[in-house]
Image (cartoon, helix red, strand yellow):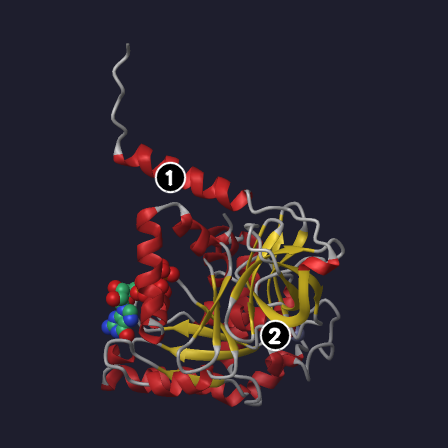
């Protein structure tokens, strides 16, 4: 008889991960009868996977639910009407009957589906930026363009403020003033020194927020500072099974202790860094709106074209020159596709 081989740690982990995946798939597809269900109640989608979704009701209880046929494109953050199942025998504990109208929708381009919704009812997008690795206004402006397209309010957060010394402070303030002058809210914060964390908590209260920003700007550290229990949770889950992957790849809604919700997933963190048309980019620079369409030539590139209304506005001090340069760099990058390809995958 062949001797049983001992599994390596990696093999064991993979088997566990597959089992967890199977279990999730096995959530039953039940045909509910009316008398098996409780009264309709309001809930919010905490996460959506396959033909099921986890719904939290107003008493903060979570129910894994089937989705009634006809309920379309349910995503994390959706407000729903659902009914609890009375039987405890099933692996599913309710059914979603209807989705309420969305206040906003975040979508990402999908090879097969065109635009694929990923999260609903987000009320603000916290664009996290910092001075280390580098302050990158082009990326901030790209995120702002994406926010303006979805109609969700952007908030700019200068993170790792502990690294800003006196000399840097002046330059940083100058940069941030550009955004303040357009009307955007700007905050400073540091997980290291604690500066600005209370103000940030106030800003998050009563809102559904997402954090976006380049790798290394300190998003995870910030989320852990605001929600220490979440850091622990993610670690535990990813250590003992493949469920960790589930929590990180699927968009999920979390509650901040002091009020407000966070929706997070890697896909959400890269929100907005995909291909845009030059027109969409121009529309996302909201201080350009009075001048767009008034250039001498209809196909004006707003670069060095004669009679360009945007260049004229810059000369008159109505548009900040750095914003016009940033616009030009973003449009250039669209043709070379350097920004988008980095975040595609
Ligand atoms: N000085 C300082 N460093 C910080 C602060 N917050 C985070 N860092 C450091 O910055 C680095 C990156 O932080 P992360 O939280 O992993 O950054 P992230 O934006 O989540 O990065 P990705 O997970 O790659 O998207 C880490 O070495 C942190 O220790 C801060 O407030 N001050
Ligand atoms: Zn022009």
Side of 246 where 303 appears, left or right: right
Q: Nearer the viewer, residue 111 or 230?
A: 230
**Labels in figure, total:** 2
- Where is residue 162? Give x, y as percent: 24, 80
Residue plotted at (41% across, 72% down)? 128
Say left or right for 241 vs 51: left
Marks 1/2 in contact by CB < 8 Å: the verdict is: no
Q: Secondary structure at mark 1?
A: helix
Q: Which mark is residue 148?
A: 2
Give the mark toward the camera: 1 or 2: 1
**Residue drawn 66% across the image and 45% down it:** 112
Residue in the foreground of this view, choosing between 288 and 190: 190
Read off the residue under disc 1: 16
Residue ID at (37%, 36%): 14
Q: In the image, residue 37 lies at what x, y percent?
A: 67, 61
Crowdedness of circle 2 by 10 Å Cα count: few (<14), some, many (20+)? some
13 lies above or below 159: above
In this view, the residue farthest toward the top is 1
Q: What element does badge 2 sit on?
A: helix
Q: Earlier in the sequence, mark 1 or mark 2?
A: 1
Q: Is residue 219 above or below residue 344?
A: below
Quadrant of res 258:
bottom left
Spatial CA distance of label 1 from label 2 is: 43 Å
Q: Which mark is residue 251?
A: none
Q: Viewed as shown, does residue 131 lie left or right of 67?
A: left
Question: Where does residue 191 sit, x and y in percent of width and height?
Answer: 28, 76
The residue nearer to you, when weighing 145 against 279, is 145
């Amino acid at each position: 008889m062949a001797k049983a081989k001992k599994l390596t740690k990696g093999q064991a982990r993979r088997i566990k991960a597959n089992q967890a995946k199977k279990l999730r798939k096995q959530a039953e597809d039940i045909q509910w009868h009316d008398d098996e269900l409780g009264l309709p109640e309001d809930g919010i989608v905490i996460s959506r996977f396959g033909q099921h979704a986890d719904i939290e009701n107003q008493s903060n209880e979570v129910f894994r639910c089937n989705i009634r046929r006809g309920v379309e494109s349910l995503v994390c953050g959706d407000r729903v009407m659902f009914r609890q199942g009375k039987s405890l025998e099933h692996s599913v504990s309710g059914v979603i009957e209807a989705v309420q109208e969305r206040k906003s929708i975040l979508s990402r381009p999908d090879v097969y589906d065109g635009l694929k919704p990923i999260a609903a009812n987000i009320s603000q997008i916290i664009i996290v930026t910092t001075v280390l690795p580098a302050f990158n206004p082009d990326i901030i402006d790209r995120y702002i363009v994406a926010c303006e397209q979805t109609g969700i309010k952007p908030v700019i957060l200068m993170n790792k403020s502990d690294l800003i010394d006196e000399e840097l402070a002046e330059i940083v303030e100058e940069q941030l003033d550009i955004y303040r002058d357009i009307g955007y809210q700007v905050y400073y914060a540091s997980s290291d020194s604690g500066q600005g964390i209370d103000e940030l908590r106030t800003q998050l209260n009563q809102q559904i927020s997402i954090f976006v920003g380049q790798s290394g700007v300190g998003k995870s550290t910030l989320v852990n500072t605001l929600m220490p229990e979440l850091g622990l949770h993610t670690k535990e889950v990813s250590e003992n099974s493949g469920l960790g992957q589930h929590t990180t790849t699927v968009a999920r809604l979390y509650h901040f202790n002091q009020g407000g919700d966070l929706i997070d997933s890697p896909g959400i963190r890269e929100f907005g860094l995909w291909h845009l048309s030059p027109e969409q980019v121009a529309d996302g620079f909201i201080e350009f709106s009075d001048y767009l369409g008034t250039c001498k030539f209809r196909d004006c590139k707003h670069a060095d074209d004669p009679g360009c209304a945007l260049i004229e506005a810059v000369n008159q001090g109505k548009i900040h020159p750095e914003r016009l340069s940033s616009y030009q760099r973003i449009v250039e990058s669209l043709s070379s596709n350097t920004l988008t390809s980095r975040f595609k995958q």
